[in-house]
Image (cartoon, rainbow, N blue to C red):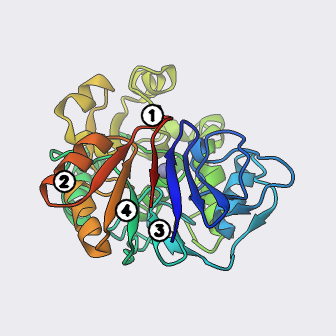
């Protein structure tokens, strides 16, 4: 195979057998093929009318629900294989010609209705490195659930409402599923919109009452309750209002919770590392499972992960986005 990888400030570009392939570009781009790994907002952008967009059906629909029409999308293409990356519903990695594997955002532990991201043997691996630093170690999901349910139980016994916080797309649906046995549960509108989209795509989530309806009907005065809301800092007016009016306690869910300063910096009462990404050990295991000859790391701690992988004997290079000049041939 011949081609090269270009580290651009507009996603990763691959020239392969006379094709220019753009992986998760951040803005409009000229390419023969554009791959969109999932529907998080930094990955979905309208492209030119004639652009061919390779993505999953779920990502296409979730993007539309977020107000972005990805354009002319295809779910299959000869020589390209979409691989489940376990990050959010519809998230996929891309395997090019059975040789070059781009993971997109990746999680290799199953959570609620999400399967583990799959590894694939490849020559060249381009792997995300959001938590690619050796201090990001996430506990098992069961342990987090156990602790959080104990906290909720304790607060409920004292009539104190709880706000569970995570990104409206992806994390909030996992929270809606995992904590659905509590009652009553209300959801912020942004969460409700994505919950509905998930239900339409076959993930049946409970039909929760939207926050504004609960507010208008004065339901929030009847405590305790749970509200599933976006991951907002405790200093936003919305969260401050919930605390002032209802004495609510906030529990945030993010991999960054591993950093002791995170909870205080964001003014959360509690925070737990329930993540939609791999932790450090999972990233290393994933690389080992793929048995690549060459590894590129992208996003987050890309330099740290590449450096650790080199110590393990891998040929690893970080893609830094701003390093426009890097063109590596293969
Ligand atoms: Zn993502």
Q: Which sits earlier in the primary sequence, circle 1 or circle 4?
A: 4
Q: CA distance from mark 2 to mark 4?
A: 22 Å
Provide residue 246's location: percent of width, then percent of height: 42, 30
Q: Which residue is mark 3?
A: 100
What whole-number distance in Å separates the C-alpha atoms at marks 3 and 2? Answer: 19 Å
Please name whichever residue, 307 or 89, is drawn nearer the observer in this view of the structure: 307
Q: Split into 4 quadrants, where in the image is the C terminus?
A: bottom left
Tag 1 near tag 4, CB within 8 Å: no
Mark 2 secondary-structure assignment: helix
Q: Which mark is residue 55?
A: none
**Quarter of the rendering containing residue 121:** bottom left
Percent coordinates x, y for residue 89 in the rendering = 54, 65
The answer to whether residue 189 is above or below residue 89 is above
| Badge number at residue 310 | 2
In the displayed structure image, the side of residue 247 where residue 185 appears, left or right = right
Residue in the picture at 62% in, 51% down: 192
Res 86 → quadrant = bottom left
Residue 132 falls left or right of residue 65: left
- Residues 70 and 200: in front is 70
Queried on whether the Cβ of the residue with tag 4 lies below 8 angstroms from ligand 1, the answer reads no
Q: Secondary structure at mark 4?
A: loop
Q: CA distance from mark 3 to mark 4?
A: 19 Å
Residue that badge 1 annotates: 323
What number is the disc on residue 107? 4
Q: Secondary structure at mark 3?
A: strand
Above or below 151: residue 238: above
How far separated are the C-alphas under marks 1 and 4? Answer: 27 Å
Element under disc 1:
loop
**Residue 99 position within the rendered picture, expressed as x and y whole percent measured from the top left:** 46, 74
Q: Position of residue 29 (x, y in %)?
A: 71, 43
């Amino acid at each position: 195979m011949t081609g090269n990888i270009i580290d651009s400030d507009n996603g990763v570009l691959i020239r392969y057998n006379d094709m220019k392939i753009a992986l998760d570009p951040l803005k409009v781009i000229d390419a023969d093929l554009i791959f969109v790994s999932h529907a998080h907002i930094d990955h979905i952008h309208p492209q030119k009318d004639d652009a061919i967009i390779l993505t999953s059906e779920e990502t296409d629909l979730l993007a539309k629900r977020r107000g972005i029409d990805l354009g002319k999308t295809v779910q299959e293409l000869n020589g390209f294989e979409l691989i489940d990356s376990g990050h959010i519903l519809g998230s996929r990695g891309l395997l090019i010609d059975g040789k070059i594997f781009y993971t997109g955002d990746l999680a290799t532990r199953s959570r609620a209705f999400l399967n583990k991201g799959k590894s694939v043997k490849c020559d060249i691996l381009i792997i995300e490195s959001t938590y690619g630093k050796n201090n990001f170690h996430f506990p098992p999901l069961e342990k987090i659930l156990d602790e959080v349910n104990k906290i909720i139980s304790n607060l409920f016994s004292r009539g104190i409402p709880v706000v569970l916080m995570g990104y409206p797309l992806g994390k909030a649906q996992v929270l809606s599923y995992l904590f659905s046995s509590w009652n009553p549960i209300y959801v912020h509108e942004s969460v409700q919109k994505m919950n509905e989209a998930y239900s339409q795509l076959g993930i049946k989530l409970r039909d929760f009452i939207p926050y504004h309806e609960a507010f208008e009907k004065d339901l929030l005065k009847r405590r305790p309750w749970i509200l599933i809301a976006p991951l907002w800092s405790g200093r936003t007016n919305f969260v401050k209002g919930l605390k002032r009016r209802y004495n609510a306690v906030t529990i945030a869910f993010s991999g960054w919770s591993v950093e002791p300063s995170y909870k205080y910096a964001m003014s959360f009462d509690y925070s737990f590392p329930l993540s939609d990404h791999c932790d450090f050990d999972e990233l290393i295991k994933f690389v080992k499972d793929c048995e690549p000859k060459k590894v590129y790391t992208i996003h987050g701690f890309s330099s740290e992960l590449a450096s650790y992988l080199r110590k393990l004997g891998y040929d690893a290079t970080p893609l830094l986005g701003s390093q426009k000049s890097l063109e590596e041939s293969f």
